[in-house]
Image (cartoon, rainbow, N blue to C red):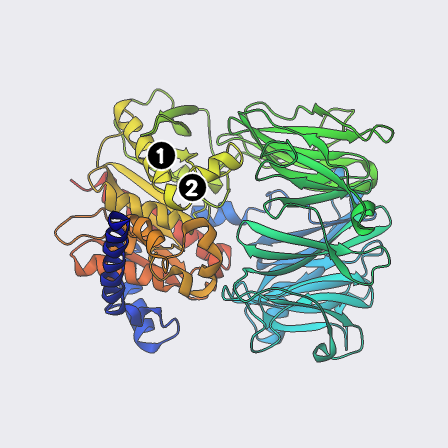
Amino acid sequence: MIRASLAALALSCSFTAVAAAQEADPYLWLEDIEGQKALDWVKQENAATDKLLLGRPGFEADRKRAREILDDDRQIAMPGEVMGDTITNFWRDAANPRGLWRQSPLDAYLAGKPVWTTLIDVDALGKAESQSWVWHGADCLAPAYTCCLVSLSPGGTDADIVREWDRTTKSFVTGGFTLPQAKSSVTWEDADTLLVATDYGAGSMTASGYPRIVKRWKRGTPLASAVTVAEGEAEDVGMNVFAFTDGDKRWPMISRGKTFYTTDYRLPNVDASRYISTIIPDTASVRDVIGGQLVVFLNQDWANLPAGSLVSLSLADMAADRQVPIVPVMTPTKAQAIENVAATDTILWVKALDDVEGKLFALRRDPASGKWSQKEVPLAANATVGIAGTIGKRDMVLATAETMLMPPTLYAVSETSAPQPVQTLPATFDAKGMTVEKRFATSKDGTKIPYFLVRKAGATGPVPALVHAYGGFRAAQTPGYLTGQPYRAGPLGLFWVEDGNAYVLANIRGGGEYGPAWHQAALREKRQASFDDLHAVAEDLVATGVSAKGKIAISGRSNGGVLVGAAMTQRPDLYGAVISGSPIKDMWRYDKMLAGASWVAEYGDPDVPEDWAFLSKYSPYHNIRRGVTHPPIFLYLSTKDDRVHPGHARKFAARLEEFGNRVYYHEYMEGGHSVGADHAEDAVRAAMLHAFLQRELVEAE
């Protein structure tokens, strides 16, 4: 008892000392997002980076080529929503940098000869309204799909405005539903009624900055008169509303996100007078509705069914508050992970990973027994597969297949016939001289970590390598065509391999590559596992002669910013350069900054001494050591990011520079968490990152 008390006292004293140190953080002023002093610092940093990179030989050629790739009008017109005999698409190219929302007859689209009609020209709308609009989507009410809720963001922030739009007249509805800018969640109950979770004023938002209250808003009445139908707690992540269509039945639902990984779901009772609780475990995720069944993904074991499985529950039974049979739908193997689920009228389509390679399955429910059967629908071997959309009444799914060297093809897939290509992206580069290998590294605890290696055929090392990884929030990293890898850096991976170097995508723990257990293995106090996995991949590249210590660059965005920040402070000997986009860096204050409070379930709570004990061991901002030469880093982000606070990157850069380290910094004024508001910015970033890697890994002694 005395020993425990002494330990607690020591931990408390340590915590108090660290807290005092953080209160004296000399760079807190950089958290003032739009403050003049902070913005002046940003301009100076941007200018210094521009001076180093923009005038380099090859920069302009890279920028121009990246822009041509991104703006190529031969890109696949990815499906939006199928609305009866019409399909929508959102399109960006050189002439339309902010994009066109448009529609085509479905049959023409499936034949590969779409006939497009513009619905909303975002560039023209922004010009007419003197706003820097960024498209955030449209929700059109089935079955007529005439009434639409259009979401637009000024500058690309997560917060947007919502305006009612008529697809028949192709205009915003005068006197229609309109929500002011906020982080809102909204869906149709019927043509004259919305469920709305938004900022209703003081006390209506959670500590994470998301809506706490859901109201029912009737057409023709002011938002202030909307009636509350559900409330969460201030400590919750937030409330969300959404709906599924099952035949001619619409199922609106309300979710209360208690933490990032626990959610309570409510659905309408039998007479739709109120929203009632369900038996869905708070750790599970609702995926789709088909034939009166709600399909649910299990993140933890439930009813003798293992985590990672799909189950179905009767919506009618839940609405009537009757006993609900729990029916197994699909249980993956140990090598598999269910990623995406989409329902057509009678088929449940499941996209799964099998050792991080894509598989597509068609599942049917027997009406008599209620049991589900499944069969694999072959699409492309050893490829990344994605569900892009569905055509309900035809029981077809629109799916993509691609590899790092094979451009994506969009297929129309049915259960009984061979997949029909709708459109294939023409090859953007000559892949004949390149190879892709899937390898496995052994992490510190013996776990096998898959990674994909791309390089020129016959290459002999060691050569500089670029390793991209994420490792968090259940998000699997799957290999895609090199012109889009890594995310938000356009064709950087392609440029790097063409130089004769190696590009690697690492499938470290914390993601969802092998289901819930793969994520939970790096959760909270286990976070070091994801860093160890990245180190293991890098060390494997060295051991196998692909690369060498000091010649390996690591790249990560958002949560990946925690990853690469921790990695560069833990192993400055191993890495030669770091790319970090929209990054999280300060694990002491992350939960006090913008949406950070919503991530406590992923990382831990720094205000709890036991949690800070493990957070402090890897917090990138707090582990920069004076007297240690850390790898040069390129930090890119957006001032308009209202998810991950710009202060993370700013403070990290400032402290690194204070201790004499090389920092390349570029903060865009627009773009939000995704950084790029348009292809022009994306192309500049790809060229800058390529120049950075060349300067630090290829030319540096």
Q: Is residue 213 shown left or right of residue 225?
A: left
The residue identified by callout 1 is 533
Q: Which of the labelled discs sits on residue 81, or is there none?
A: none
Disc 1 packing (10 Å; few <14; some 14–19; many ≥20)? many
**Can you give x and y, in whole percent of width and height, for residue 64 in the image?**
43, 50
Dots 2, 1 in contact, CB < 8 A: yes
Asked if 593 appears above or below 547 in the picture, the reply is below
Circle 1 — which element?
Answer: helix
In the rendered view, tell whether residue 438 sits above or below residue 271. Answer: above
> Which residue is at 81% across, 66% downward?
169
Residue plotted at (66% across, 63% down): 121
Which numbered dot is residue 471? 2
Please report whichever mark, 2 or 1, sits nearer to the chain's N-terminal start.
2
Measured as percent of width and height from the top left, residue 260 is found at: 53, 52
Which residue shows up at 39% across the image and 60% down it?
590
Q: Find numbered disc 2 in the image and state the secondary structure of the residue it sits on.
A: loop
Image spot of residue 105 (x, y percent) = 80, 47
Q: Which amino acid does label 1 sit on?
A: Asp
Q: Residue furthest top?
A: 458
